[in-house]
């Protein structure tokens, strides 16, 4: 089971997981220009596979307790959860 931290009624942190790859990649693509204003790494994300490799590495680090990576999920008024 994925580690989850409830922040508020509508906000949760979920430990990074393989199931986050596609929505995370889509968010990076959608916001790449904005992200690159302050971060260097978005320019190196060229495919969903790049995101998958990063997530897999972070899952391993998280499971071993070396680093923690969480995805932020917000619940909307229809109780749908989505990555923000």
Image (cartoon, rainbow, N blue to C red):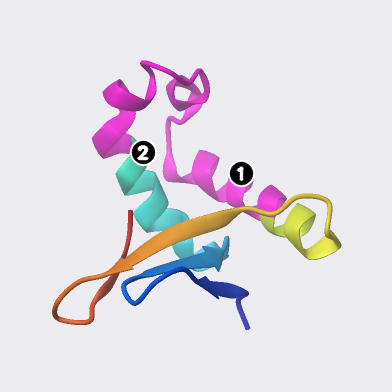
In terms of secondary structure, where does tag 2 sit?
Answer: helix
At x 31% / y 72%, what residue is drawn? 10
Name the side, left or right, on which 67 lies relative to 35: right
At x 70% / y 49%, what residue is drawn? 57
Question: Does the stretch in magenta take in 74?
Answer: no
Considering depth in this image, is 69 or 45 the residue closer to the camera?
69
Residue 12 lies, in percent from the top left, at 44, 69
Name the side, left or right, on which 14 lies relative to 31: right
Q: Of helix, strand and loop, which mostly describes the magenta segment?
A: helix
**Dot 1 surroundings within 10 Å: few (below 14), some, or many (20 or more)?**
few
Image quadrant in which you'd find residue 36: top left
Report the Cα–Cα distance between label 1 and label 2. Answer: 13 Å
Name the side, left or right, on which 30 lies relative to 69: left
Name the side, left or right, on which 30 lies relative to 63: left
At x 43% / y 30%, what residue is drawn? 46
Quarter of the figure that contains the N terminus: bottom right
Considering depth in this image, is 75 or 43 the residue closer to the camera?
75
Question: Does the stretch in magenta take in 41?
Answer: yes
The magenta segment? 29-58
Image quadrant in which you'd find residue 4: bottom right
Q: Which mark is residue 54?
A: 1
Considering depth in this image, is 70 or 8 the residue closer to the camera?
8
Mark before the other along the chain sequence, 1 or 2: 2
Residue 84 lies, in percent from the top left, at 33, 53
Q: Which residue is mark 2?
A: 28
Residue 44 lies, in percent from the top left, at 50, 23
Residue 70 lies, in percent from the top left, at 56, 57
Q: Residue furthest front?
A: 8
């Amino acid at each position: 089971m994925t580690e989850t931290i409830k922040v508020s009624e509508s906000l949760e942190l979920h430990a990074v997981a393989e199931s986050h790859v596609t929505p995370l990649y889509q968010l990076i693509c959608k916001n790449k220009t904005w992200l690159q204003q302050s971060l260097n790494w978005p320019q190196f994300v060229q495919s969903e596979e790049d995101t998958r490799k990063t997530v897999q590495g972070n899952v391993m680090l998280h499971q071993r307790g070396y680093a923690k990576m969480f995805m932020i999920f917000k619940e909307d008024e229809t109780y749908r959860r989505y990555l923000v």
